[in-house]
Image (cartoon, rainbow, N blue to C red):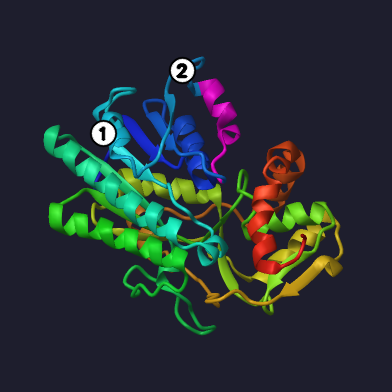
Amino acid sequence: MTSFAPHCLLVTGGAGFIGSNFVRWVLERDKDVTVVNLDLLTYAGNVESLEDVELRHGRQGDGRYVFARGDIRDLGLLQPLLQGRSAPPPDGIAHFAAESHVDRSIIGPSVFVETNVQGTLTLLEACRTELEARPRPFRFLHVSTDEVYGSLGPADPRFCETTPLAPNSPYAASKAGADLLVRAYVETFDFPAVITRCSNNYGPYQFPEKLIPLMITRALRDAPLPVYGDGRNVRDWIYVEDHVEALWQALVRGEPGAVYNIGGDTELPNIEVVRRLLALLGKPDSLIQYVTDRPGHDRRYAMDCARIRRALGWAPHHDFAAGLGATVEWYLTHRPWWERVLSEAYRTAAAMYLIGR
């Protein structure tokens, strides 16, 4: 087992759902780390998700948090950040920046390739060039998804790290392409990278186009809840705080070149998740509206997390029922946060489901 203690982390996509939770978690738990958050602030990036972080750790706080707006495809922007012109030179990168919504990738796949593949390549090249010029201990954490593995049948064993990649959506294909680029840099250039692949996240600050916040926000407005196909597609759910803890362990203790699967050991059909949400909100099941299944809709995901449990001693802490209840409570008490982004969140929903227009 390796051990790595970063002093300055460059987090790409740190204003997004998982990225913002990671930034907050790291700054709260390691008082010696500075975080530089690079985010383009596209529709799903929201600086309001880090207002508390800015207050405590930005210029008016302890100075350990720096925000930089920009695109990971911009080499001219990445180079000075890696050289340390606006903060200490980073000795670690947590790479979250990505287009991540399957439905949007079906409607417009090009931006997924441009951001997820070309963006990752540009970031890798910038890091490699910087480390050749100024060698230092360094670690690159590439945050990926279980969707790169494709789909499982009801009785198939869970995905493990050696499961062949078989992506079925443009989003999944773009993430698989990025994964393979990272792997190639490890093998070709001895680049110090770790890859993680995680199951479906839920929790605070998730943009309301994904299943759980979409259903919560629509139910609170008594709008129809669109459920694809028969609703029996199975996902493995993990509370976002459990995921970010696993990411930290992979970053500081993971083996360079390794892949680690991360999951919540909670396989549930989508329709059951929707019904649980309705029960928590006190809303009727009559809000459920089955819609035509989306193209290439994977039937089941399930993650075998034996490697990260064994190698890094990580395990999820949040029970799904408790985590779901906490998530519902967060959306109930943070209406201004999600109400401001509803029009963009529902735009793809309207295009895909042809409802709610």
Q: Position of residue 58 (x, y in %)?
A: 48, 21
Residue highlighted by disc 1 = 79
Residue highlighted by disc 2 = 62
Compared across the picture, whether 104 is left or right of 132 comes to right
Disc 1 residue crowd, few under 14, some 14–19, many 20+, Cα 10 Å: some
The residue drawn where x is 40% and y is 44% is: 248
SS class of the residue under badge 1?
Answer: helix
The residue drawn where x is 33% and y is 75% is: 164
Is 49 colored magenta in this rendering? Answer: yes
The residue drawn where x is 57% and y is 68% is: 235
Vertical arrangement, residue 246 with respect to residue 303, above or below: above
Q: Which residues are magenta?
A: 44-56
Amino acid type, label 1: Gln
Disc 2 residue crowd, few under 14, some 14–19, many 20+, Cα 10 Å: few
SS class of the residue under badge 2?
Answer: loop
Instruction: Say which quarter of the image contains residue 162.
Output: bottom left
Give the CA separation, mark 2 to mark 1: 25 Å
* Residue 291 vs residue 19, the one in the foreground: 291
